[in-house]
Image (cartoon, rainbow, N blue to C red):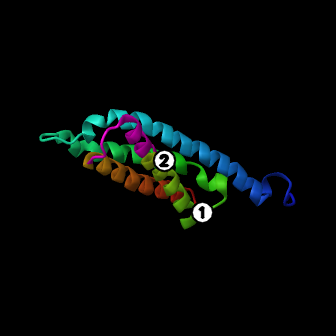
Amino acid sequence: MARFGHGKTDPIQILKNYARTYFIKVASVAAGWIPIYFISHPFRREGDLNVLMLFAPMIGALAGVVAGWHLAQDAVEDSSMHGVTLWFILVVGAAAPMWIMDAVLNKLTGWPWTFGGFMMLTAATLMALASAVWVASAQE
């Protein structure tokens, strides 16, 4: 067994390595939200007969499952953490980039914030929570 400070058994080095991996995965979730934002625009519009708004949560749910799964994949092994602490970090890392990118893209495009967009982001957040916790707990 190696001493602390040498090799992979150093807890600080393990967390540094995981932080790098974590932030790359968070950035990929943020980058992945950009095409989803533009693809889902017809589902977000408000209008008299916008029936497509009913399907916005399905798009968000699918995106949330992918984001949560992506972040939680190999997280227990890479971070040496488990339980509620890891679950919290994974859920924040999956949900925050989606909400932040949506707000930034709303400002850039000038499209209004709509109920369809809120439903989509809420479904994405809930499914990211469910998939991240499920995958991380299955790895323990």
Question: What residue range appears in magenta?
Answer: 101-114
Q: Can see residue 48?
A: yes
At 38% across and 56% down in the image, what residue appears? 126
- The structure residue drawn at horizontal position 37% and vertical position 35%, both measured from the top left corner, is 109
Q: Report the side of 69 relative to 106 (left or right).
A: right
Q: Which quarter of the picture shows residue 35?
A: top left
In the image, 138: left or right of 33? right
Residue 75 in the figure: left or right of residue 52: right
In the displayed structure, 39 sits above or below 114; it is above
Disc 2 designates what residue? 97
Query: What secondary structure is found at the residue carrying circle 2?
Result: helix
Q: Position of residue 50 (x, y in %)?
A: 17, 40
Q: CA distance from mark 2 to mark 1?
A: 22 Å
Query: Quarter of the image containing the N terminus?
Result: bottom right
Between tags 2 and 1, which lies in front? 2
User: First in sequence: mark 2 or mark 1?
Assistant: 1
Q: 17 or 100: which is nearer to us?
A: 100
Name the magenta segment's main secondary structure: helix
Rendered location of residue 110, percent (x, y): 34, 37
Residue density around tag 1, few if under 14, some if 14–19, many if 20 or more, within 10 Å: some
Mark 2 residue type? Pro
Query: Which numbered disc covers residue 37?
Result: none
Q: Nearer the viewer, residue 49 or 108?
A: 108
User: Residue sitting at 78 percent across and 52 percent down?
Assistant: 8
Q: Is residue 61 magenta?
A: no
Question: Where does the image place residue 129, in percent across and percent down from the top left?
Answer: 44, 56
Q: Is residue 65 visible?
A: no
Amino acid type for the residue under numbered disc 1: His
Callout 1: SS: loop
The quadrant in which the C terminus is found is bottom right
Q: What numbered label is drawn on residue 82?
A: 1
